[in-house]
Amino acid sequence: MIGFSSLWISLLGLPMFANISSDRFEFQEQDDPQEILIEMRGVLRCRFEQDNERLKSARVYSDQGMLDLELNSVIERDAVKMKDRKVVVSGSLVQRPDRRNRLAWSVQVTSLEAVGPRQPWPPIINKFKRISVERSGGFAGLMEKQTLFADGKLETRSLKNDTVTDVSNLDQQVLRQLHDLVGRTGWQHIHLPRPPSSAEGIADQMRIKVLIETQDRDFEFLLTSPGTDQIQPLGDLIQAVGGGDL
């Protein structure tokens, strides 16, 4: 395969994390200009459903970035025996709408080969002390606060009577990505849309208050539901604290 330079990668509209050396990712144009073949070397990390051990997601991580793998028969067949091992994955890059209807890159896998031993998960580097997401309003009159601690403990508390309604632990892979997200994001540079005044407000609008507490400083955001979906990576953080995937 032909290794593409970073210039070609950017012209093709690939995600920024694909802008790395050709010994990790290799791309090749096909007759179909929409198809880009890829060969990627890295460590295969998998997530499974807690109840039935069914494969939930698969990603390949290199030193420079990661890519999601589309779940198909190849992945589902080999994920258990190859998880946490160094692999070479081949396939084509595709764009699909994610859970929030945004186009995201992933690999449509045609072959997966293990080329190295199992790799332990790296230690989680704490970038936040606590993340609190407080939701109130909406048609259902929701009033709850979710607090995620650095070790992954997730506490849900009712704001109506100040009682804890649920305690769980966030998936360690999601927790690791959240710490990374907080550590690499310039939160002070995020410009939020101006919340509507009471005269302009939408009836039963959801109000979301986010507090990110780090070792150095705290960041607080007040959002309303129309603006939340437009703000990245803040929207990803809110979704992940609620138990969703990044």
Image (tube, rainbow, N blue to C red):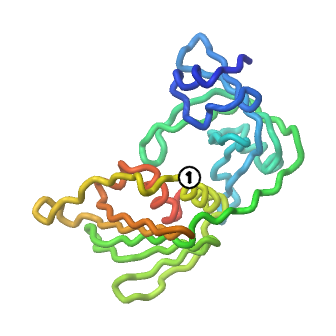
Figure quadrant of the N terminus:
top right
Residue at x 66% of width, y 41% of height: 65
Q: Give x and y (percent) for residue 133.
A: 43, 69
Above or below for 4 versus 223: above
In what element is the residue under mark 1? helix
Q: Give x and y (percent) for residue 20.
A: 67, 32
Residue at x 68% of width, y 28% of height: 91
In this view of the protein, which residue sits in the foreground, 19 or 137?
A: 19
Q: What residue type is labelled 1?
A: Arg
User: Circle 1 is placed at which residue position?
Assistant: 184
Residue at x 83% of width, y 51% of height: 119
Q: Give x and y (percent) for residue 5.
A: 64, 21
Quarter of the rendering containing residue 9: top right
In this view of the protein, which residue sits in the foreground, 231 or 48?
A: 231
Q: Give x and y (percent) for residue 199.
A: 10, 63
Above or below for 136 versus 183: below
Q: How crowded is mark 1: few (under 14 residues within 10 Å), some or many (20 or more)?
A: few
Quarter of the rendering containing residue 70: top right
Q: Can residue 155 be seen in this snapshot? A: yes
Q: Which residue lies furthest to the right in this view?
A: 117
